[in-house]
Image (cartoon, rainbow, N blue to C red):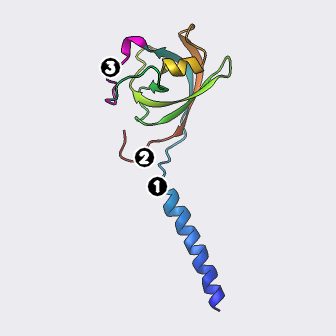
């Protein structure tokens, strides 16, 4: 009889661990989009981004019109398969038809420095924790 209660207690403990423990991760809806990426760099170095962080062209960051700050986004160049992950910390791009504006470091990963723009697929890989926008 005692072992039966231990089994129930174990199951309940595991249930609570996975429901409460995993509840601390902020999961949002799936977000994927295809479009054109551009990059920005030297002219903005050190200037404040929309999130308040100073822009650093050597960090893998990006600007997006609506995704929350702190969001991690996987960017895959559709014509060469190169991939990078960026953190959203700015707003933009403000050019019609473009879906993301990446830093120079991210553009280097995608091999788009010379091209300036590239066809990409983007996917959110981690939403920010609650309270961050």
- Relative to residue 107, is residue 49 drawn left or right? left
Range of magenta residues: 42-52
Mark 1, residue position: 24
Distance between mark 1 and mark 3 Cα atoms: 33 Å
Q: Position of residue 112 (x, y in %)?
A: 58, 13
| Crowd rating for badge 1 (residues with CA inside 10 Å; few <14, some 14–19, many 20+) | few
Q: Where is residue 125 in the image (x, y as percent from the top left)?
A: 55, 38
Of the numbered discs in the image, which one, if any, rests on residue 47? 3
Q: Does the magenta stretch include residue 44?
A: yes
Q: 52 and 77: which one is in front?
A: 52
Q: In this orientation, does residue 76 appear? A: yes
- Relative to residue 81, is residue 74 drawn left or right? left
- Relative to residue 10, is residue 98 drawn left or right? left
Q: 57 and 124: which one is in front?
A: 57
Q: Residue at x 61, y 83 (%)?
A: 6
Helix, strand or loop: magenta stretch? loop
Q: Position of residue 86 (x, y in %)?
A: 51, 29
The residue lying furthest to the bottom in this view is 1
């Amino acid at each position: 009889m005692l072992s039966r209660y231990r089994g129930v207690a174990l199951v309940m403990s595991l249930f609570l661990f996975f429901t409460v423990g995993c509840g601390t991760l902020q999961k949002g809806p799936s977000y994927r989009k295809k479009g054109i990426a551009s990059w920005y760099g030297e002219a903005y170095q050190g200037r404040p981004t929309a999130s308040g962080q100073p822009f650093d062209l050597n960090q893998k960051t990006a600007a997006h019109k609506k995704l929350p700050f702190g969001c991690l986004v996987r960017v895959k160049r559709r014509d060469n398969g190169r991939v990078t992950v960026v953190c959203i910390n700015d707003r933009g791009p403000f050019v019609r038809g473009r879906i993301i504006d990446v830093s120079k470091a991210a553009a280097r990963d995608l091999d788009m420095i010379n091209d300036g723009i590239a066809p990409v697929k983007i996917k959110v890989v981690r939403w920010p924790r609650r309270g961050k926008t």
